[in-house]
Amino acid sequence: MGVFDKLEKWKEQLTDKIAEKAAEQAAKQSKAAAKLAAKKGAEAAVAAAKDAGRKLEEALFGDDDGGEAAPESAPPPSEDAAAAKKRRAKEAAEAEKQAKARAAASKAAEKERAARAARAEQEVDDELAALKKKLKK
């Protein structure tokens, strides 16, 4: 039974390490998503401020750009920011969903390993009992 106890202990340690690694990976993904969201938000704010500055200048001084026009091909920053925010929320939800799925799979695999170990231990116990019975005869 000592071997099975050691095997069980090693299995628990391995499962704990796997769970820790999954949690660390989820944290890194969340951190990266938050960093990206902050960067995109800052870029959108700068673009909005520049656009507001251009419009204010145009309103005060008229159109003195010398033929240089504001880029109209780009969507307004508020729409871009809203789309980016939705995308980040979707990515974060997907990352969380994947982390939960990995944790559930890890739990299921652990449960299966425990069941296999229990069956193997039961088989060994049964064989041992049969041998003892055989020796008594």
Image (spheres, helix red, strand yellow):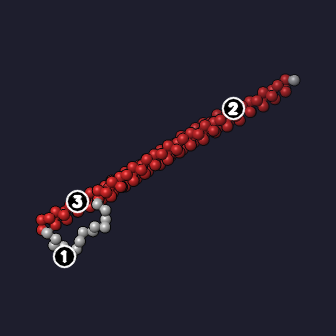
As drawn, the label of residue 85 is none
Tell which of 56 and 33 is nearer to you.
Answer: 56
The disc labelled 3 sits on which kind of residue? Ala
Cα distance, mark 3 to mark 2? Answer: 72 Å
Q: Which of pointers 3 and 1 indicates the residue nearer the eye?
A: 1
Q: Earlier in the sequence, mark 1 or mark 2?
A: 2
Q: Which of pointers 1 and 2 indicates the residue nearer the eye?
A: 1
| Label 2 Cα neighbours within 10 Å, binned few <14 / some 14-19 / many ≥20 | few
The disc labelled 1 sits on which kind of residue? Gly
Cα distance, mark 3 to mark 1? Answer: 22 Å
Q: Left or right of 100: which side holds 132?
A: right
Residue corresponding to mark 1 = 66
Cα distance, mark 1 to mark 2? Answer: 89 Å
Tell which of 92 and 16 is nearer to you.
Answer: 92
Q: Is the Cβ of the residue at disc 3 closer than 8 Å to that at disc 2?
A: no
Residue corresponding to mark 2 = 1
Say which quadrant the C terminus sits in. Answer: top right
Q: Secondary structure at mark 1?
A: loop
Q: Is the Cβ of the residue at disc 3 closer than 8 Å to that at disc 1?
A: no
Say which quadrant the N terminus sits in. Answer: top right
Does residue 10 appear in this view?
Answer: no
Question: Please, is residue 118 above or below residue 70 in the view?
Answer: above
x%, y% of residue 81?
A: 32, 56
| Label 1 Cα neighbours within 10 Å, binned few <14 / some 14-19 / many ≥20 | few
- Locate residue 40: give its quadrant: bottom left
Q: Secondary structure at mark 3?
A: helix
x%, y% of residue 17?
A: 53, 43
Q: Earlier in the sequence, mark 3 or mark 1?
A: 3
Question: Please, is residue 125 above or below residue 102 in the view?
Answer: above
Residue corresponding to mark 3 = 49
Please name the residue shown 71% across and 35% down the image: 120
x%, y% of residue 118?
A: 67, 33
